[in-house]
Amino acid sequence: MRKKLLVFGIAITIVNTNVFAQENEEDVEKGNLSEMLDTYSHYDVEPSPSVWLLSNAEVNSTAITSAFYTKLYQGGFIDQSLKDQVKNRLTSNNLLGGEFNSSIYYHSGSPALFKNKFSYAISLGYTIDFAAKFSSDLFNFTFYGNKSFENKTADFSDTRFKMMTSQFVGFSLIQSSDKYYLTVGLNLIKGQNYYDFSVNKGSVYTAPSGSYLDVVANGSFVRSDTTHNDFTSFNGMGAGLNLIYNRHLKDNSNLVFSASNVGAMYWNSATVRTNVDTSVQFDGLKVDNIFSIQDSLFTNVSGKNVFNDYTHNSSASRLTLLPMTFRADYYKYFEKGFQFLGSIQYKNWGSYIPRATATLGFRLPAYWYLHVGAGYGGYGQAHLSLGLSGMVGKTYLMFGSSDCLGFIALNKFSNEGLYLKAFYHF
């Protein structure tokens, strides 16, 4: 199971979220869809405090189906049909990635001390970010074995995998006026673990009848302290800046620009970097599934001809960039409860493709809203979202799927996402 997770880095993971609510019905009607501006926290300057609970998980891929990575993550048997479904979707470069976030926020409201123009927020959160890039040959070699590459070369070049798990405490200051909201925040981050696996050049040639293998590997593997990697581990520290500018336009519309988690992590001296530059020929092995290999199979296997064998490990503190998100949104409220949100988002993590989305909000009875959205990009391709939001007393709820195609047709689509947001106004 651990070998499977290492190859593809399947993890449950998020997009930072926001919650905003008003007590009167008119403001609720105009504010619900602004909850979908989910790369930052949108605070309104209210006179009384509030508490927010936010949770979101999302995984996307250009090739790996939902049925496949669910079975892989759970450790179940992956049959031929599951493998073939993915094989038919593969291209020369394939992406897989996702995020997870769970956090709690306290918002001060607008104390008289600040003359009703400023407020602040304090937050605690837990996040996971991961991203992978891999060739079709890597998938086929891993799940069909080298038997399918007899007298052929399997190319693993340009394989990438990055993953970071962290916790944070944050503080934000929010300024409000009739024309705009401006939020400036800082997250202080505790690094739990970090992995950065990169194969610049890699291949395996299987000779006819499997008489020998030619293996070429050039790349690096950076990992934080693996002896201490649970929730309490403190393997790194960092800081991320959050900026939000929300401009009120005419005709009930808003234009919002945001940058979140802009900063870096400093990983301690137990962080290990392994550099590999190896060319070696092995006596032949022919297997149908790399995960069926037993360790005893390699007991009598050794390099037949070593042309170049360089592996170097070094332990030292390292500075890495945080997974940053940059986003622009346009929100428009129409009469009779119809709303529109258009957005474009970029993330510097892995091989993220700029993601564009369009979301419509439809008012239901009792001032609840139905949100339906579509988009393209990110770590996947097409996206479809579906959710509900509304007030229950003084509690604002928003829940649904940020990516529901993978739930609708597990064997055909690769995208899954769930979110739950709750806001209580004192």
Image (tube, rainbow, N blue to C red):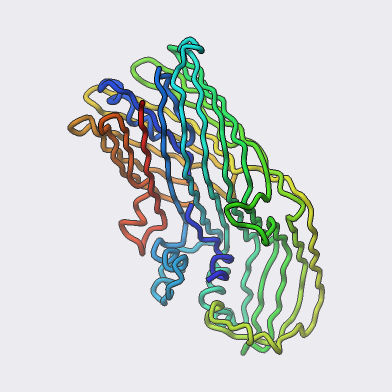
Q: Position of residue 311 (x, y in %)?
A: 79, 67
Residue furthest toward the top?
A: 115
Q: Residue 386 falls in which quadrant of the image?
A: top left
Q: Residue at x 43, y 75 (%)?
A: 77
Q: Is residue 383 above or below residue 356?
A: below
Q: Is residue 15 above or below residue 340?
A: below
Q: Is residue 290 above or below residue 8?
A: below
Q: Position of residue 268 (x, y in %)?
A: 74, 49
Horizontally, residue 262 falls left or right of residue 356, namely: right
Q: Position of residue 331 (x, y in %)?
A: 38, 27
Q: Residue at x 50, y 58 (%)?
A: 11
Locate the C terminus by quadrant: top left
Q: Position of residue 404 (x, y in %)?
A: 34, 51
Q: Is residue 3 above or below residue 10?
A: below
Horizontally, residue 288 falls left or right of residue 366, namely: right
Which residue occupies the foreground of this view, 145 or 226?
226
Horizontally, residue 294 falls left or right of residue 58, namely: right
What is the count of numbered marks? Answer: 0
Q: Residue 169 falls in which quadrant of the image?
A: top right
Q: Residue at x 81, y 76 (%)?
A: 307
